[in-house]
Amino acid sequence: MAAGLALSGHNQAVFLRINAASTEWLPPALWSAITLSGSVLGMIALLAPTLKTQPRWLAAAFLAAPLGVLFSQGGKRYFDVMRPAGVLEAGSFQQIGQKLYVHAFPSGHSTTAFLVAAVLILAWPRDDRRGRAALVLLSLAALIGLSRIAVGAHWPLDVLVGAAGGWLAGSLGVWLSGRLRFWDRPGGVRAMAAVAVATSLAMIFVDLGYPQAHLYQIGLAAWGIGGAAAALMRDRER
């Protein structure tokens, strides 16, 4: 899809069409909450409660993170593509939250969302339910990618390439988690829970650029802290 869009030369036109339509689909506050969920801090908080029963998921995500960061941040610096706000006239499209102008390609939020989707799907504990889980998880990841267009932060090509890179990174993370089984030991779970608590606490104080989703951000932080604490308590009981 990314290659087809790049060759067609319609990247900007598709952005304007999706961005304009998104104003009728969901209100800005909801788009803000969805896009905030695709941040690295947001995804760790969302996954924190799974440490109690499926620690491999967060372990695979952590193992995939270096490649995901190298892909997204390296691509941003290397290609240095201007974002919609740096190209289009102000007021010609919907902008929600912090205005960003540079380092568009690829989308970091899309990379993160599809990295996590790959981890959950490929490490799903029951093969008979993997197909249904994949449908839901890929839809949610796609919604996060779509939100980056809706808030005016990324071009469609940024989102598609970010999604592809995230899936590849997540696949590597799952492969590594099958060989580096630190998540199968109490010490590994405690270390991951400590990271989840620290990053979730950071969400309370860090400005992620979407003030309309501030209450959601606080709630997401509480979700992450509570989930990590539950994992620690279970480990202590064992």
Image (spheres, helix red, strand yellow):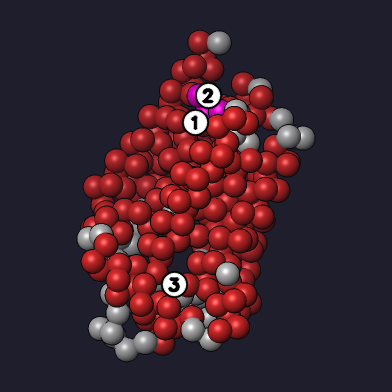
Question: Looking at numbered disc 3 in the image, what kind of residue is underneath it?
Answer: His
Instruction: Measuring from the top left, give residue 96's x and y in whole percent.
Output: 29, 68
Residue 13 against residue 198 in the figure, above or below: below
Residue hosting label 3: 154
Residue hosting label 1: 50
- Measuring 70% from the left and 48% from the top, which residue is drawn there? 172
Instruction: Measuring from the top left, give residue 95's x and y in whole percent.
Output: 29, 73
Q: Work out how far the residue at label 1 is from the one at label 2, CA to CA, in angstroms.
A: 6 Å
Residue hosting label 2: 53
Report the residue that reaches farthest toward the top: 237
Q: Is residue 41 visible?
A: no
Q: Which mark is residue 39?
A: none
- Measuring 49% from the left and 16% from the top, which residue is drawn there? 234
User: Do the CB atoms of the residues marked 1 and 2 lie less than 8 Å apart?
Assistant: yes
Question: Looking at numbered disc 2 in the image, what kind of residue is underneath it?
Answer: Thr
Q: Element type at marker 2?
A: loop
Quadrant of the image containing the C terminus: top right
Q: Work out how far the residue at label 1 is from the one at label 3, CA to CA, in angstroms.
A: 30 Å
Number of residues whose C-alpha sits closer than 10 Å to that of mark 2, classed few (under 14), some (14–19) or many (20 or more): few
Q: How many numbered marks are there?
A: 3
The residue range painted magenta reads: 51-56
Residue 108 against residue 123 in the figure, above or below: below
Instruction: Measuring from the top left, give residue 237's x and y in whole percent.
Output: 50, 10
Residue 174 against residue 150 in the figure, above or below: above
Residue 51 against residue 110 in the figure, above or below: above
Number of residues whose C-alpha sits closer than 10 Å to that of mark 1, classed few (under 14), some (14–19) or many (20 or more): some
Q: Which of marks 3 and 1 precedes in the sequence?
A: 1
